[in-house]
Image (cartoon, rainbow, N blue to C red):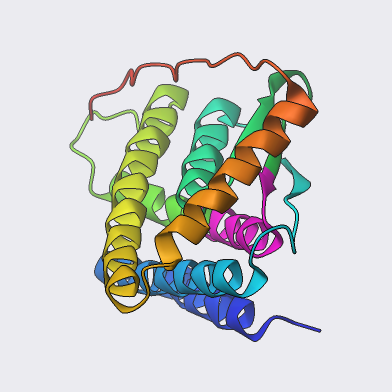
Amino acid sequence: GTDPVLARIRALLAKAESTPYEAEAVAFTAKATELMTRHAIDAALLAGSGAEEPVMVRIAVDAPYVAAKSLLLQTVAHHTRCRTVFRPAVEMSTVVGFPTDVAGTEVMFTSLLVQAQRALAEAARSAPPGTRVRSQSYRSSFLAGFTQRIGERLAETNRAVETEVEAADRRALPALRSRRLAVDEAVEAQFGELVKSRARPVSDAS
């Protein structure tokens, strides 16, 4: 059946996408992240060791701005306890993680792409005269900045949840660490040696 927690996460992200106010979008996204992390901790504690295995899901990273979007997906996946392997030749990323986290990564990434487009349109409206808001460098640089801010907010939300949960149950963080290790092992078994690449530097300061 449908995961009720995932349904609540989708509903929160839908609100984040539809609000014209950035502060509200941030608050709804943070609440969705908090729910996701609590759900992951519950799953880790419930499953114990070996009861559940990491899964792999392929996600298309559509042009334009494939590099910037793949970095956003990687950032979301990292803070949702998953890993991504991007194949530029086919513009496709494989997300590796436990089922709940992979599903969370998918819905969060999809929502953030919508939120980024709204934020980009708003930034373009308020940009200083002479700014080339429709240029590829401006839009790609905007997505890079958006990704960095999102990464910081996801990390901040996760730290707060983990601190609170650890105080209540000291098994929680070791259970999450064990799952991260299982994800790393799944990536290594499936893909072997991977090449890390640096993101392109931001080329439009505005």
Residue at the (74%, 61%) spot, across then down: 52
Quarter of the figure that contains the C terminus: top left
Q: What segment is highlighted magenta in the picture?
A: 96-112
66 relative to 99, above or below: above
* x, y percent for residue 96: 68, 44
Asked if residue 102 is among those painted magenta in the image, a careful observer would answer: yes
Q: Nearer the viewer, residue 195 or 180?
A: 180
* x, y percent for residue 187: 69, 33
Q: Main secondary structure of the magenta part?
A: helix
181 relative to 106, above or below: above
Q: Is residue 83 left or right of residue 52?
A: left
Quarter of the figure that contains the N terminus: bottom right
* x, y percent for residue 91: 72, 28
Res 95 → quadrant: top right
200 relative to 61, above or below: above
Residue at the (54%, 37%) spot, across then down: 69
Q: Nearer the viewer, residue 66 or 186?
A: 186
Q: Nearer the viewer, residue 95 or 13?
A: 95
* x, y percent for residue 200: 43, 16
